Amino acid sequence: MAGEQAVRSRMGPWGITVLGLVTAGVLALLGLLAFGMARQGTGRTQVAINTVGQAAAVQPRPAADFQLGLFSGELLRLSDLRGKTIVLNFWASWCPPCRAEAPELQKVHQTYQGREVVVLGIDLWDSEQSAQAFIRDFGLTYPNGPNLKGDIAIEYGVMGIPETFIINTEGQLVRRWIGPLTAAQLTALIEEVR
């Protein structure tokens, strides 16, 4: 009790107010993140590693636009890809299923290169060094960029990684795959919407 009073007297009323506001702000951001992750209706508020691949129901809707700084140094805006089928994959270097599916995504990228299909990777909760090593280790040549704040993942309702979304040529989000997928599974999803 005496220690608490000593801290309060050293901080003064403004210091205590600022500390309270900062604490409230951090709690509000954490609450917003939890809400965003839980809004898909599953009640899960923790991000998971998705180990089993499966198609998930998705209500077709306009894909939320975003801007992403790529590891290559370029800036990509999703809406600039309108007219192409987009494979949007959320991953992290420390995620074992992401490591298993990376070569599969690269195969699909190579198969569809120049055919109006774009594979785009969004790295979450990773260091740049680890992400760059992942890209190098798997020889990934499709565009990848970090989403350190996780706002794109929240907007798309990502509950775990890996997760993959298919956006059609009109900019509509039309397919969702939770967990790792194979080149054959991804090719089937692409062909369904083309």
Image: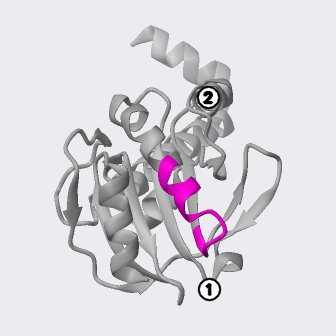
Q: Give above or below for 111 relative to 90.
A: below
In this rendering, the count of numbered labels is: 2
In the picture, the quarter occupied by the N terminus is: top left
The residue under the point 56% across, 46% down is 21
Q: Give above or below for 61 relative to 87.
A: below
Identify the magenta region.
107-117
Q: Is 110 inside the magenta-drawn segment? A: yes
User: Real-space Cα distance between discs 1 and 2?
Assistant: 32 Å
Residue receiving disc 1: 83
Residue receiving disc 2: 127
- Expressed as whole percent of the image width and height from the top left, the position of residue 25 reads 53, 49
- Expressed as whole percent of the image width and height from the top left, the position of residue 160 reads 32, 46
Q: Is residue 151 visible?
A: no
The residue under the point 60% across, 25% down is 130
123 and 143: which is toward the camera: 143
Q: What residue type is labelled 2?
A: Ser
